[in-house]
Amino acid sequence: MLETLVIALGGNAITLPGEPGTIPQQFAHTAETLEHLLPVIRAGHKVVITHGNGPQIGNILIRVEEGERRVPPLPLDTCVADSQGGMGYMIQRLATALFRRESIRRDVACIITQVLVDRNDPEFINPTKPVGSFYSAADTEGLRRDKPHWILREIEKGRFRRVVPSPHPLDVLEKNAISELVESGALVVACGGGGVPVAWEGNSLLGVEGVIDKDRASSLLATQIRASKLIIVTSVDQVAIRYRQPGQQWLGTLTVAEARAHLVAGEFPPGSMGPKIEAAIDFIEQGGEECIITSTEQVAAALDGKAGTHIIAAWGRRSLAFPPPHN
């Protein structure tokens, strides 16, 4: 059965840990990722691709800092939009060439996506998302003087970073355009980096200094365009409890209740798997059929029920059984 899918690409799909993240490297990894998604696209499913932008937004912020003595600095919301455009172009160009090679008659469209947030979100009181460069204690003295609006926190001993709000996404403003494009058969790239955070002030729509979690934004978009499945692509084939500890257990299928219980028990840390599980729970509770968490290489197999972790509303709706991954 053909379905509408939102596929949320993690950082490893575009930039590998430890790499400089040059443009040729990003193009190479993205091309490989699209090859893994090809069976899903060729099958005729309606697909929206979302993506993270962690390393890319960091590089953009460094360019802003290094260049601000010669050119006007860019606010963070504009930097997020900048990353959406550049990365969307990369995915768009590669997918267009791939479709030509495979004789797939399908348009590819990138949508610069704005996501509404609430200026009263608690994140604006206590921001938690580190962005940009690391600084020494000596560096912070000058930064606090020159950039009094920045909040700097010690992330590691003696190393500081700027932290910004990561507000909860409320509404994807381009959802109708995205839905129409998907229904027309186009492959759509949207919500890059979680979308550009914006907020209403009267009749003015203002950019917000913050970064929205990519998986939460993808979950919201999937709900709003009535996708049947949300596929969160990460660096592991399946979710595990007691990860990298004695008694590690890979999970093939989880109900929402089971996923929430493991989350409360601390099995899924806030900085890694936690937001993905929260996004999955939100999607299912808002009417989504299923959320799959898996690696790039296993997306097609997971969609066929042969790999990945499948999060569902309750056991009565679906039962999956397959062996755990080899790693």
Image (cartoon, grey):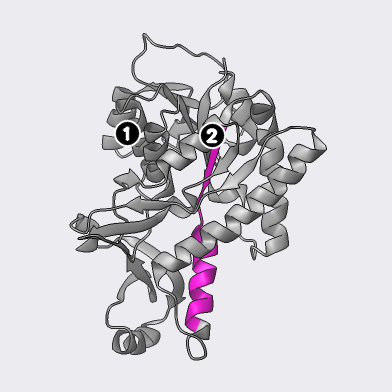
The disc, 1 or 2, on the residue closer to the chain's N-terminal end is: 2
Q: In percent of the image, x 62 and y 30: which residue is there?
A: 298
Q: Residue furthest top?
A: 316
Give the residue type that dot 2 points to: Val
Q: Is 32 on the left or on the right of 148, as rendered?
A: right
Q: Is residue 268 visible?
A: no
Q: Is residue 233 magenta?
A: no
The front one of 285 and 196 is 196
Which numbered circle lies on residue 243?
none
Query: Can you tell which quarter of the image residue 314 is in?
Result: top left
Q: CA distance from mark 1 to mark 2?
A: 22 Å
262 w.r.t. 88: above or below? above
Q: Residues within 10 Å of mark 2 (few under 14, many from 20)?
A: many
Q: In percent of the image, x 37 and y 32: which residue is there?
A: 223
Residue picked out by circle 1: 282
Query: Can you tell which quarter of the image residue 75 is in?
Result: bottom left
The front one of 310 and 114 is 114
Magenta segment: 47-65
Where residue 96 appears, as percent x and y from the top left, is 72, 44
Q: Is 214 on the left or on the right of 183, as rendered?
A: left
Magenta stretch: dominant secondary structure: helix
Q: Quadrant of the C terminus?
A: top right
Q: Secondary structure at mark 1?
A: helix
Q: Quadrant of the N terminus?
A: top right
Q: In percent of the image, x 34 and y 62: which residue is there?
A: 210
The front one of 145 and 92 is 92
Q: Secondary structure at mark 2?
A: helix
Q: Are marks 1 and 2 in contact (CB under 8 Å)?
A: no
Give the residue type that dot 1 points to: Asp
